[in-house]
Amino acid sequence: IELERLGIHESVEAVFPPAELADDLAALPAEISVVDDDGIPSCDAIVTLEHREAFLEVDWVHSIQAGVDRFPFDEFETNDVILTNSTGIHDRTVGETVAGYLLMFARRLHDHVANQQERRWERPDWDAAFTLSDSTACVVGTGTLGRGVAETLGGLGLGVRGVRRSDEPVPGFDEIYTTDRLLEAIADAEFVIVTVPLTDATRHLFDAAAFDAMRDDAYFVNVARGSVVDEPALIDALEADTLAGAALDVFETEPLPEDSPLWGLDEVIISPHCAAYTRDYVRDVGDLVLENVDRLADGGEFHNRVV
Ligand code: NAD
């Protein structure tokens, strides 16, 4: 790859201002510019949030997200386009967001916020609040997100169990179950947190059988991808009270449609796919791009290469 022109696709605007990343990369020995769709073909490399057909004509595409399920891997391969992603940077951000959801449920903080809107002084029922240090969380997926969640929750005193494909131990997890024992792993946990990528193997991993296997007083958290969950099955379980509640950052359709029943359920916390947001996001992505430009210059292997 001859890197003469690196484009920052305007779609990154949803996460940070493209010009901030351009500033961060200004020292590179290449022309750096913010591009719209028409500007893509003149670039050798693109940093982007969304996918565009025209990317098949550039040499290297870097996704500012860890999840790359929306990129057509086969077509990238056929057209010799390298795809890299931004895994490795979301451990603390997503870990702290998940800790926040759990604290809201256990300490009833979301009720106070709702009551405050109505200027209502109302204490929780005597048996509604509990402490996280008496609870167990089952984290499904032990990559960057899973480890960040495990470390943050471990710091709050929860017992943390992990589910992964191999049974090798992982730092931060008290015990590991393999994916084929998923239903057993989630059966007695107060919190189940999903942190796997969306792949053919994980699509609808959480279906009616999984929600059935969970405790009736358990909370479900999805910070992975919407389609890892069979959303109608989740809504059924919440409406039937066979699940205590859910915190959801990702959905099968985003933005979450206004008529989704999820908006109206009491024990559901909704965030608009921003669990990993931080003012440092742009610098973290910039560091990944700079590292790969260095590796390119040295003729080394790309870091975080997917295709
Ligand atoms: P990662 O590659 O570091 O970790 C993913 C882990 O999942 C790996 O350990 C992998 O082995 C494991 N895995 C894959 N298939 C599995 C299966 N069938 N069963 C069990 N484990 C399996 O990626 P990451 O940075 O931790 O991100 C994980 C996913 O979370 C991303 O793909 C993305 O979809 C999502 N994500 C969401 C946000 C957000 O804002 N909500 C932010 C970052 C990532």
Image (cartoon, rainbow, N blue to C red):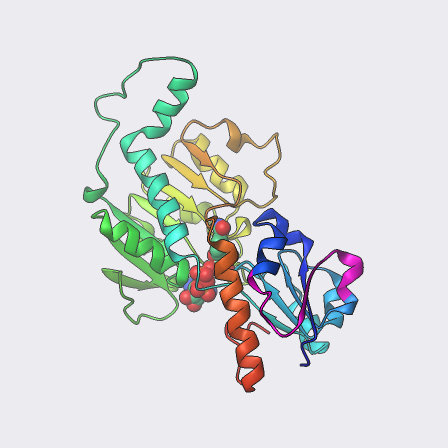
Q: Residue furthest right?
A: 38
Residue 214 in picture, x, y percent from top left = 35, 45
Residue 277 in picture, x, y percent from top left = 48, 48
Q: Is residue 183 above or below residue 142?
A: above
Residue 42 in picture, x, y percent from top left = 78, 68
Q: Is residue 263 left or right of residue 57?
A: left
Task: Indicate the quadrant where residue 164 lies.
Answer: bottom left
Q: Is residue 41 left or right of residue 255?
A: right
Of 136 and 99, nearer the camera is 99
Q: Which residues are magenta?
A: 24-40
Residue 202 in view, yes or no: no
Residue 167 in picture, x, y percent from top left = 31, 70
Residue 219 in view, yes or no: yes
Q: Residue furthest front?
A: 27
Residue 37 sits inside the magenta stretch: yes
- Quadrant where the N terminus lies? bottom right
Of 257 and 15, nearer the camera is 15
Of 148 and 202, nearer the camera is 148
- Quadrant where the C terminus lies? bottom right
Of 144 and 262, nearer the camera is 144
Residue 116 sits inside the magenta stretch: no
Task: Indicate the quadrant where residue 8 lies.
Answer: bottom right
How many numbered markers are drawn?
A: 0
- The residue drawn where x is 54% and y is 30% is 261
Q: Is residue 1 left or right of residue 181?
A: right
- The residue drawn where x is 38% and y is 24% is 113
